[in-house]
Image (cartoon, rainbow, N blue to C red):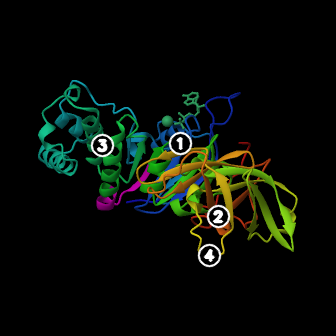
Amino acid sequence: MATLELRNVNKTYGSGLPDTLKNIELKIDDGEFLILVGPSGCGKSTLMNCIAGLENISGGAILVDDADISGMSPKDRDIAMVFQSYALYPTMSVRDNIAFGLKIRKMPAAEIDEEVARVAKLLQIEHLLSRKPGQLSGGQQQRVAMGRALARRPKIYLFDEPLSNLDAKLRVEMRTEMKLMHQRLKTTTVYVTHDQIEAMTLGDKVAVMKDGIIQQFGTPKQIYNDPANLFVASFIGSPPMNFIPLRLQRKDGRLLALLDSGQARCELPLGMQDAGLEDREVILGIRPEQIGLANGEGNGLPTLRAEVQVTEPTGPDTLVFVNLNGTKVCCRLAPDVAPQVGETLTLQFDPAKVLLFDAKSGERLGVAAPASASAHASNVAQFKGR
Ligand SMILES: Nc1ncnc2c1ncn2[C@@H]1O[C@H](COP(=O)(O)OP(=O)(O)O)[C@@H](O)[C@H]1O
Ligand SMILES: [Mg+2]
């Protein structure tokens, strides 16, 4: 069991090359599950390799249980890593693959047998122990790779996109198993993914990364409800948040966003206090589930008539697309709503859930500093471009 802290970690792969990791600050408590999420090439694997000791950092410190481990060799760090490619030994049986790390550590044979039996049971691969990796499906190989890490009971687990080579159905199954396993073992874990659903469902904390910079670090709920900038808001959520560029107005002392469907207009009152927002070019963000059908009862929410452009019944929802201010906007409606294309719907909006972003910098507007996981961990880095 261990805490993990990254203090101002920098990484460059060579002089003249741009920094791959920039001033990374993260802290995870004992037993926590941290998700590191971001687009391909943003530096996720580099960060994992630095924690594991497979790459040296260029600046800063990596602390496990408050002791700096950044000078230690990988084998002294007591950290186990599962890679995206399973990296199993093809000529060894599953049993020997799992036992390999224990043999190297000179664990007595009887204890090794016990440990292999324990993880095989945990991962439900007992019937596969005498097979070679080539005789296993992708999902089974992935479990063996996991078993090899679990056999070691290290202080920290690192998983680098362990599910990305699996087909969609197996991914979802393994996602639940990962969560169950962590609930049972409670080992401090860093888990890398580029899949925002995995990010939202698996982690106690989420770090969203772009261009080697942590854009936001917080609980899944904070990241979803209170994104620090346009990048975080657009990366997390499926279907994604709608973004409508517009100029804010003020009427009778209230800040307004004017929405126009071509058929009707709606003055959306905004709760933000910031007086400096008036007349400003912003991007208004609203999630598809914050737009509903007006039920005619008049619950006080602003409404707008709009023509249906496209519908996408997904099963659990019907996604309906309308045009607002010249932008395609997705509304997530109930599955029994099946409007025709060209039909006019009366939509209603929850102004309390509307977010504003600066049109140029992408920073959130009209809020105090976004809530962060802890005072120390607050690391909402400068957002650079879209
Ligand atoms: N060994 C290396 N030498 C030079 N550049 C590298 C090396 N490994 C990764 N990079 C660069 O660092 C950046 C981040 O890569 P990586 O950490 O693999 O991203 P991710 O895992 O988020 O897809 C990329 O631009 C990549 O080309
Ligand atoms: Mg990677």
> From the viewer's perspective, is 287 left or right of 77?
right
Of callouts 1 and 2, the N-terminal one:
1
Residue labelled 1 has its Cβ within 8 Å of some atom of ligand 1: yes
Badge 2, how many Cα within 10 Å: few under 14, some, many 20+?
Answer: many
Give the quadrant of the C terminus.
Answer: top right
Q: Quadrant of residue 91?
A: top left
> Which region is colored magenta?
182-190
Q: Look at 44% across and 57% down and name the residue there.
A: 336
Q: CA distance from mark 3 to mark 4?
A: 52 Å
Q: What's the amino acid at mark 1? A: Leu
In the image, residue 266 lies at what x, y percent? 74, 62
On screen, residue 195 above or below 367: above
Q: Which mark is residue 349?
A: 2
Disc number lying in front (2 or 3):
2
Q: Quadrant of residue 357?
A: bottom right
Of callouts 3 and 1, the N-terminal one:
1
Q: Which mark is residue 146?
A: 3
Q: Please, what secondary structure does the residue beneath circle 4 have?
A: loop
Q: Which residue is mark 4?
A: 299
Using the image as rendered, state which of residue 250 and residue 366 is in the foreground: 250
Q: What's the amino acid at mark 2? A: Phe
Q: Please, what secondary structure does the residue beneath circle 2 have?
A: strand
Q: Please, what secondary structure does the residue beneath circle 3 have?
A: helix
Q: Please, what secondary structure does the residue beneath circle 1 have?
A: helix
Q: Do the numbered discs 4 and 2 sit on residues whose CB atoms are within 8 Å?
A: no
Q: Look at 48% across and 55% down and name the residue there.
A: 200
Q: CA distance from mark 2 to mark 3?
A: 45 Å
Q: Which residue is mark 1?
A: 47
